[in-house]
Amino acid sequence: MRIHLVVYLARTSEGEEQGVARVPSGRGRPSWHECAAVVPGFLIGRYLGLAPESEETWSEHRPD
């Protein structure tokens, strides 16, 4: 499972909300349902790509 970044538009009780979500998925790109499970009120999104590895994970593999 990998983490993907998705720019989204959602509808909440306060109105519309935009943002970037980190969506876990075993697919090449997350499905609408996977995005909706992470973002309440998810309407639409645009795929940005895979999320970068965390700083901690990267530093563990960095050569000295």
Image (spheres, rainbow, N blue to C red):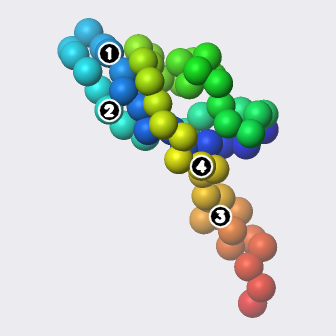
The quarter of the picture where the C terminus appears is: bottom right
Marked residue nearer the N-terminal end (3 or 4): 4
Tell me the amino acid under the disc marked 1: Arg
The span from disc 1 to disc 2 (Cα, nearest Å) is 9 Å
Left or right of residue 10, residue 24 in this image: right
Marked residue nearer the N-terminal end (1 or 2): 1
Residue 27: percent from left, percent from top: 76, 34
Tell me if mark 1 has few (under 14), some (14-19) or many (20+) residues whose alpha carbon lies within 10 angstroms of its own. some
Element type at mark 2: strand
Residue visible at 42% across and 31% down in the picture: 8
Q: How many labels sit on residues?
A: 4
Tell me the amino acid under the disc marked 2: Gln
Residue visible at 69% across and 68% down in the picture: 58
Q: Which residue is mark 4?
A: 49
Residue visible at 78% across and 73% down in the picture: 61
Residue 24: percent from left, percent from top: 66, 34
Q: Which residue is mark 1?
A: 11
Element type at mark 4: strand
Q: Which residue is mark 3?
A: 56
Marked residue nearer the N-terminal end (1 or 3): 1
Residue visible at 60% across and 34% down in the picture: 23
The span from disc 1 to disc 3 (Cα, nearest Å) is 34 Å
Q: Which residue is mark 2?
A: 18
Tell me if mark 2 has few (under 14), some (14-19) or many (20+) residues whose alpha carbon lies within 10 angstroms of its own. few
The quarter of the picture where the N terminus appears is: top right
Left or right of residue 3, residue 43 in this image: left
Q: Are marks 1 and 2 in contact (CB under 8 Å)?
A: no
Marked residue nearer the N-terminal end (4 or 1): 1
Instruction: Work out whether residue 52 or residue 58 is closer to the camera in this orientation and state it.
Output: 52
Tell me the amino acid under the disc marked 4: Gly
